[in-house]
Amino acid sequence: MAEYKGVLIFGEVTNGKLASITTELLGCGRNFADELKEDLCCLLVSDKTGETAPRDAIVFGADKVYTVEDSLLKEYQGETYIQVVERLAKELSPRVILMGQTPVGRDLAPRLAFRLGTGLSTDCVDISVDSETKLLRQTKPVYGGNAQAIFICDAMPQLVTIRAKTMSPRERDDSRKGEVIPTKIEINMSPIKTKIVEKVKEEVTGIKLEDAPVIVGGGRGIGGPEPFKTTLKELADVLHGAVGASRPPADNGWIPEAMHVGLTGKIVAPEIYIAIAISGASQHIAGCSGSKTIIAINKDPEANIFREANFGVVGRYEEVVPAFTTKLKELLAG
Ligand SMILES: Cc1cc2nc3c(=O)[nH]c(=O)nc-3n(C[C@H](O)[C@H](O)[C@H](O)COP(=O)(O)OP(=O)(O)OC[C@H]3O[C@@H](n4cnc5c(N)ncnc54)[C@H](O)[C@@H]3O)c2cc1C
């Protein structure tokens, strides 16, 4: 029987740089590797992995970085990527494999679990190692975020996808030493049944929701599309933040789908989340509960959002928000 050892991260590269989810995975992977006294490896797959991303993988915690370059790997395609990940996972026999709960991770992880004959926990928000069994305790929200379940899988390797912004990356350490191992893996084209015909980039103006330090989120109580572009946008601009929303504004077409926060939308963890006219349904909270500070503005003092918020204002947003924005401008100017 194979001896399973070490932690393997499936890294994602965007425009030649490590995706933020990868630095987060490296952060928690490093902790496990230290606890287990085993290596932390990172796999980077692309047509050109370059020098920055592999170096940064080491800087953020990896001991070894396997780079696989092939023109067939330019765009993510499950049928090509799985060949690379399966080969490397079989060669390295890691105890733990971590992937991001990203569009790529969501597609790749179940394929890999099937091919390795192991289990998979998706969308985990917390993981820890059981010191006796060395198995992972995998925590994930269930029942629409109303409860959390802990899973332990005794099949090897332990395969998990992790929700973005739930793990902290380590501080950059440019003095860290590690090994970059260019690896050649032949891609077999015969099982490939799909091809990418066109890639349409989502238009993003201003700060991306996931990267914004402050998010001003509006709910159904905003009443229409206009205040998102005026009242809420003005507040977000003063705070150098971005405008987000609960699901009803997206369903109603008041805001683009990409701005919707929650279980079925974006998962965000800004420094400050200002929830305006949002009732605080669990499916919405599932997307913003990682925020450092939540401020709620709602006319209903019984709204659930006040149970989640650190600070709250009971009142009509049409009055509260402009006054708040004016005061902030005064304070920032002074
Ligand atoms: C499977 C599933 C997945 C879902 N996924 C998501 C998700 O990802 N994200 C998400 O957000 N929801 C999601 N939902 C929907 C979720 O259950 C709630 O219905 C939704 O979050 C409610 O949005 P809301 O708070 O904006 O609206 P409401 O619940 O209608 O609340 C509106 C709030 O605005 C307040 N209000 C009204 N007027 C004013 C005013 N003038 N000034 C101040 N306050 C005012 C009201 O007091 C009320 O609290 C999902 C539901 C299901 C079943």
Image (tube, rainbow, N blue to C red):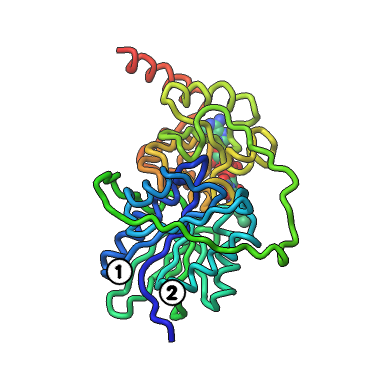
User: In the shown orientation, is residue 255 left or right of residue 156?
Assistant: right
Q: Which residue is mark 1?
A: 38
At label 2, the amino acid type is Ser
Q: Is residue 225 above or below residue 68?
A: above
Residue at image position (38%, 55%) is 180
Label 2 crowd bin: few (<14), some (14–19), many (20+), radius 10 Å: many
Most foreground residue, 81 or 258 = 81
Label 1 crowd bin: few (<14), some (14–19), many (20+), radius 10 Å: some
Tag 1–tag 2 contact (CB < 8 Å): no
Identify the element where label 1 is drawn: loop
Residue at image position (45%, 68%) is 149
Residue at image position (38%, 53%) is 167
Q: Is residue 324 above or below residue 138?
A: above
Residue extending farthest bottom: 1
User: Hey, which quadrant is residue 213 in on the image?
Assistant: top left
Looking at the rendered image, the quarter that the C terminus falls into is top left
Most foreground residue, 88 or 100 = 88
One can see residue 307 in this view: no
User: In the shown orientation, is residue 66 left or right of residue 247?
Assistant: left
Residue at image position (54%, 69%) is 86
Residue 145 placement (x, y as % from top left): 50, 58
Mark nearer the N terminus (1 vs 2)? 1
Can you tell me which quadrant of the image ligand 1 is in? top right
Q: Is residue 226 above or below residue 119?
A: above
At label 1, the amino acid type is Glu
| Disc assigned to residue 285 | none
Residue extending farthest left: 175
Q: Which residue is mark 2?
A: 93
Residue 194 placement (x, y as % from top left): 74, 57
Q: CA distance from mark 1 to mark 2?
A: 12 Å
Residue 201 placement (x, y as % from top left): 64, 37
